[in-house]
C-alpha cells in the first residue's frame, strides 16, 4: 500500500518511516564547525544515495548553546571541532564509551592523548577518525592507515603548517622581514590573531607526532618531538638560498634510524628537485618514503574552514559505510571528449614576408589567439614557436589542420599541451 492508498498516512510521515537517519552531533561551531554544518546539509541527498542512510544534524554544542548529554543521547556519531584538550578529551572519551563513532580534527588532543582515545575506541569497537587533523584536506591519514598499510615506511617528510609556508614563501618572493610577512599572512587570513603555535613549530610538531604514530606503528607523543620555528629567519638567509637555487621550508621529519625513530621539525633548505621544494604559499604536502613504493607525495590546501570541513565530512561518510565499500553511482555524468587546453605550437616555415600573418589568420579563423611567439630565421626557413591561449581542443586541431595545408609550411606542425595552472 502506498501513502496515496492510505489516507491516514501523510507523505511526510511515510517518508520519515522509510528513511533511515544517521544522526550526527556537532561539538563546536566555529570556522570548521559552521562549514561542516553547511556541507552536511548540502551533500545529504548524495550521501543518502551512497550509504542508504540520511545524515541529519542532531544537535550543536558551543559555549552558549546545546547540552552535551542531550546531543550524545540523540547521536550515532559525534564530530568534535572545539579544539584544545578539555573539554574535548572528556567528551570524546564519553562518546566512545557510550558506543558512538567519533570524528575530530583536533591535532593537539591526538598528539597528547591519542593512545588513550585509540585504546578506548578499540575497547568499545568504535571508529575514531581524524583526517582533518593533519594537512587539512590532503588525505594523508587515510593513505598511511589504509593504502600503505602493507608498506614498511622509512621516512615521512612534511610541510604541515600552511601559515609558516606562506610566511617563508612571501619572505623569499618579496624580501620582506619575518614580521612583515606574518602581518601579511594575518591580513589574508592565513595566520590566526595569535600565531605563536604556528611560527614556533609546535603546531607542525603535533601533526608530525600523529604522522609518525601512524607511519611507524609506535606511540609518539608531542613532548617527544623536537621542534624549532621560523622566527629567527632573516631576509638575507632567503637571499642566499635564492642565489644557491635552494628553497627554505619548515620541514617535519619522522624517520627510522637503526632501531629507533626520530621526529623533528625545523627550517631546512631543499634542493629544487626535492618533491617538497615547489610547495609554496599556504599549501601543505607530505612525502612518504618506503623501499616498496619508493616515494609518494601528496599536497593540497592545509587548512581553512571549508577545506577542513570537507575532510571531516569524508570521515563521517566513511564511518557510515561498512568498511569494504564498492563504488556507488550517485549520478550518471556525461563523458566530456572536447576539453579546453593551451598549446605550444612549433612550425617550420618559409622565411618570407607575410608568413606570420598567414598563420595568425588561420588561427584566428578558428577562434585561437596567440599568447606569445618567438620567430627565428634559419637560412631559407624560419621557425615559429608560439604559445596559444586556452581554447577547446577541437578548435585548436581545426586550426592546426588549416595551418598544415599552408604552402609556406616546410614540415608538419608540432603541438604540445601546456598546463597553465599555477598551484600557489
Ligand atoms: N581552522 C582551520 O583551518 C583548521 C584546520 C585544521 C584543523 N582545525 C582544527 O579544527 C578544530 C576547530 O577549529 P576552528 O578553527 O573551527 O575553531 P574555532 O573557530 O575557534 O571554533 C571553536 C568552536 O568550539 C566552541 N567551543 C570552544 N570551547 C568550548 C567549550 N568549552 N564547550 C563547548 N564549545 C566550545 C566555540 O564556541 P563559541 O562559538 O561559543 O566560542 C566554537 O564554536 C580545532 O581542533 C582545530 O585545530 C582547524
Image: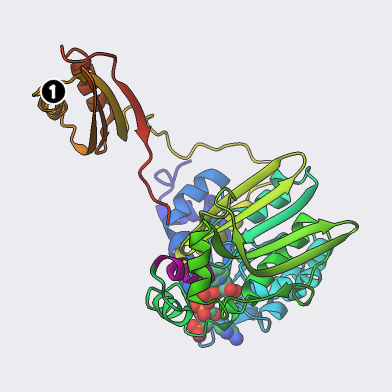
Residue toward you, 240 or 218: 240
State the residue at coordinates (42%, 33%).
332
The residue under label 1 is 355
Q: Residues within 10 Å of mark 1 (few under 14, many from 20)?
A: some
Task: Give the quadrant of ligand 1.
Answer: bottom right
Q: Residue furthest right?
A: 259
Whether residue 357 sits left or right of residue 37 in the image: it is: left
Question: Where residue 216 sits in the image (x, y, percent)?
Answer: 80, 56
What range of the chain is rendered magenta? 163-173
Q: Is residue 253 a member of the stretch shown in magenta?
A: no
The quadrant holding residue 97 is bottom right
User: Is 176 placed left or right of 143 in the picture?
Assistant: left
Quadrant for the C terminus, please.
bottom left
Q: Position of residue 237 (x, y in %)?
A: 53, 71
Location of residue 216 with respect to 339 vertically, above or below: below
Q: Is residue 63 left or right of residue 353?
A: right
Q: Nearer the viewer, residue 266 or 334?
A: 266
Q: Is residue 371 visible?
A: yes
Closest to the observer, 144 or 160: 160
SS label for mark 1:
helix
Q: Quadrant of residue 93?
A: bottom right
Q: Is residue 291 above or below residue 246?
A: above
Q: Main secondary structure of the magenta part?
A: helix
Amino acid at each position: 500500500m502506498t501513502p496515496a492508498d492510505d489516507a491516514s498516512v501523510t507523505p511526510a510521515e511515510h517518508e520519515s518511516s522509510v528513511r533511515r537517519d544517521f544522526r550526527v552531533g556537532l561539538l563546536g561551531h566555529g570556522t570548521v564547525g559552521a562549514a561542516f554544518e553547511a556541507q552536511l546539509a548540502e551533500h545529504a541527498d548524495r550521501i543518502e544515495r551512497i550509504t542508504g542512510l540520511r545524515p541529519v544534524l542532531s544537535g550543536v554544542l558551543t559555549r552558549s548553546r546545546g547540552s552535551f548529554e542531550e546531543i550524545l543521547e540523540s547521536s550515532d556519531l559525534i564530530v568534535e571541532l572545539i579544539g584544545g584538550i578539555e573539554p574535548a578529551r572528556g567528551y570524546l572519551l564519553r562518546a566512545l564509551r557510550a558506543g558512538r563513532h567519533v570524528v575530530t580534527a583536533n591535532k593537539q588532543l591526538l598528539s597528547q592523548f591519542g593512545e588513550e582515545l585509540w585504546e578506548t575506541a578499540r575497547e568499545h569497537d568504535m571508529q575514531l577518525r581524524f583526517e582533518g587533523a593533519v594537512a587539512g584536506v590532503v588525505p594523508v591519514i587515510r593513505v598511511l592507515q589504509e593504502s600503505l598499510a602493507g608498506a614498511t615506511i622509512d621516512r615521512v617528510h612534511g610541510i604541515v603548517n600552511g601559515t609558516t609556508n606562506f610566511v617563508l614563501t612571501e619572505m623569499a618572493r618579496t624580501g620582506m622581514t619575518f614580521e612583515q610577512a606574518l602581518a601579511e599572512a594575518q591580513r589574508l587570513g592565513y595566520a590566526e590573531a595569535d600565531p605563536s603555535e604556528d611560527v614556533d613549530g609546535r603546531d607542525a610538531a603535533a601533526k608530525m607526532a600523529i604522522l609518525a604514530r601512524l607511519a611507524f606503528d609506535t606511540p609518539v607523543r608531542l613532548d617527544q618531538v623536537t621542534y624549532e620555528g621560523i622566527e629567527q629567519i632573516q631576509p638575507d638567509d632567503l637571499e642566499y638560498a635564492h642565489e644557491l637555487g635552494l628553497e627554505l621550508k619548515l620541514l617535519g621529519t619522522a624517520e627510522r634510524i637503526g632501531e629507533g625513530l626520530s621526529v623533528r621539525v625545523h627550517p631546512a633548505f631543499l634542493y629544487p628537485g626535492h618533491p617538497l621544494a615547489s610547495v609554496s604559499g599556504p599549501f601543505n604536502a607530505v612525502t612518504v618514503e618506503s623501499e616498496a613504493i619508493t616515494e609518494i607525495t601528496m599536497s593540497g590546501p592545509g587548512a581553512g574552514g571549508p577545506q577542513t570541513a570537507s575532510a571531516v565530512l569524508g570521515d563521517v561518510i566513511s564511518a557510515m559505510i561498512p568498511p569494504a565499500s564498492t563504488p556507488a553511482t550517485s549520478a550518471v555524468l556525461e563523458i566530456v571528449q572536447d576539453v579546453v587546453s593551451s598549446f605550444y605550437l612549433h612550425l617550420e616555415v618559409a622565411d618570407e614576408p607575410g608568413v606570420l600573418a598567414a598563420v595568425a589568420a588561420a588561427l584566428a579563423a578558428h577562434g585561437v589567439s596567440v599568447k606569445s611567439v618567438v620567430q627565428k630565421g634559419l637560412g631559407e626557413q624560419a621557425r615559429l614557436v608560439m604559445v596559444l591561449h586556452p581554447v577547446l581542443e577541437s578548435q585548436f586541431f581545426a586550426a592546426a589542420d588549416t595551418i598544415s595545408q599552408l604552402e609556406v609550411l616546410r614540415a608538419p606542425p608540432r603541438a604540445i599541451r601546456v598546463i597553465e595552472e599555477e598551484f600557489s
